Image (cartoon, rainbow, N blue to C red):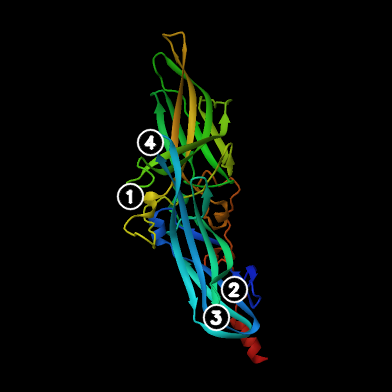
Amino acid sequence: MISLLPKKIFQSTKAPDYKLSLDLYLDSDTIYLKGLDDDERACASDSVLRGVLNVNVDHSYLLVESLKVRFVGKASDNHYYQDSQGKKLLKPVLTELINDTYEYDAKTLLKGTYNFPFQFLIDPKLPESIQFLYGSRNYYVEVEIKYSNQEVEILAHRDITIVRCPLANSPKYTEPIDARGCWRDLVPYDISIGSKIVLVDKPFGLNVNVYPQLKSPGSTATLKYIRIYLIQKIKCPQSVEDMSHTESLLDTQYYVITHKSCLNKVESFHPNEDGSINESLKITIPSVCQQFKVLPYNSNIGSHYSDHGDTSEPFTERAFKLSHYMQVAMGFDLHQSDAYSTEFKELTFKGKIHLVNPKIESNAPPPAYDSSEFNYSTKITREKSLSWLYTNGRLDMEQPPSYQKLVRLCNS
């Protein structure tokens, strides 16, 4: 049996004339949306935001003409424009993502307390919450009330955070990143990451293997270092048209901002007897890297449409895009027997990852082979296995009586 345990996430406000007060209760102010790409979101079910609005009437009676509870989502994208002097300017472009409303019938309320439950179904195609220099995605619940010929008042407002997470059975959990090759037909190598899904502030495994050199006449290579980088790429819409021509947004190009941070480096090695080098690294992506903030954002697919305004144009065609990559750089000293100098060369590999919020770790299945040693638990309890039913649910573990026990009870 699943029983609901309401959380005390609420906001209490009083009307200016003190004739009524509102208590807004929510089961949670964080919503988890499933799916990292088109295919996953098509399979994902809607998330649910539940709540109760308590209206406390302190007057003998009130005629409530209008009572609405809204779930609202708004997007802001800073577009780059180039003026006549070649300077790049930023102009915010606002879009309404969602505006769902619960509207209750007009009625006369006597002195007392009244409960108005509500529930919103949240589409998994909505982008997750984010706030940074080049744009934002914000959500909130607000209560709007009009009574006794008063002007419309917004008496309650609560911010909602939407977090993106993979499906519980997402193939990306066990889909590794693997690169194999032979540098200059001389040095075989293998680079692997156990999963394309990486949690912020949580360690994951990255393996770099350099195998014995192949026989090459007159050439030898020495590995000098291995460096691991996080690359965060932000693509901001831009237009070369004048800012007054809004129709230029329909043909949008992008201005790319790239952030790069070194997460780990190895400069001393201990080769095996056969000359191979095996480095199993423990990498953690922090929420803040050097001079930039890490933004776990995965809503870059082109299927978001605004329900308000021109729906013929995909929302993401005019929105910023965020992507993340792991880059492995290996530096070699290349020696030629017919030359007295040493030539330095660098081999780089870049693989795309899905960077997600660490809050979803408890819903993750067992990790891939080379990351299972890093603070993950493969033990799944009965309570966790049913956590998808309701985020605030409680599982009643009491079992029904056995047949023998029922017989003894009947005979007694």
Compute the Cα span from label 1 to label 2. Answer: 50 Å
Compute the Cα span from label 3 to label 4. Answer: 55 Å
Q: Is residue 357 left or right of residue 100?
A: right
Instruction: Provide the secondary structure element on which disc 2 rests.
Output: strand
Mark before the other along the chain sequence, 2 or 4: 2
- Which residue does the image show at 39% across and 62% down from the upper left? 308
Picture coordinates of residue 67 (x, y %)?
52, 76
Q: Residue type at mark 3: give it.
A: Val
Q: Residue type at mark 2: give it.
A: Leu
Nearest-to-viewer mark from 4 and 1: 4
Mark before the other along the chain sequence, 3 or 4: 3
Q: Residue type at mark 4: give it.
A: Ser
Q: Nearer the viewer, residue 375 or 131?
A: 131
Q: Which residue is tagged 1?
A: 247
Answer above or below: position of 208 versus 234: above
Picture coordinates of residue 244 (x, y %)?
37, 47
Residues packed near mark 2 inside 10 Å, few (<14), some (14 to 19) or many (20 plus): few
Q: In this view, does 105 lie to the left or right of 38?
A: right
Picture coordinates of residue 272 (x, y %)?
54, 27
User: Is mark 4 in CB contact (under 8 Å) with mark 1?
Assistant: no
Compute the Cα span from label 2 to label 4. Answer: 61 Å
Q: Which of 141 and 50 is in front in this view?
A: 141
Q: Residue type at mark 1: give it.
A: Glu
Residue 64 is marked as 3
Q: Which residue is tagged 4?
A: 84
Q: Which residue is tagged 2?
A: 4
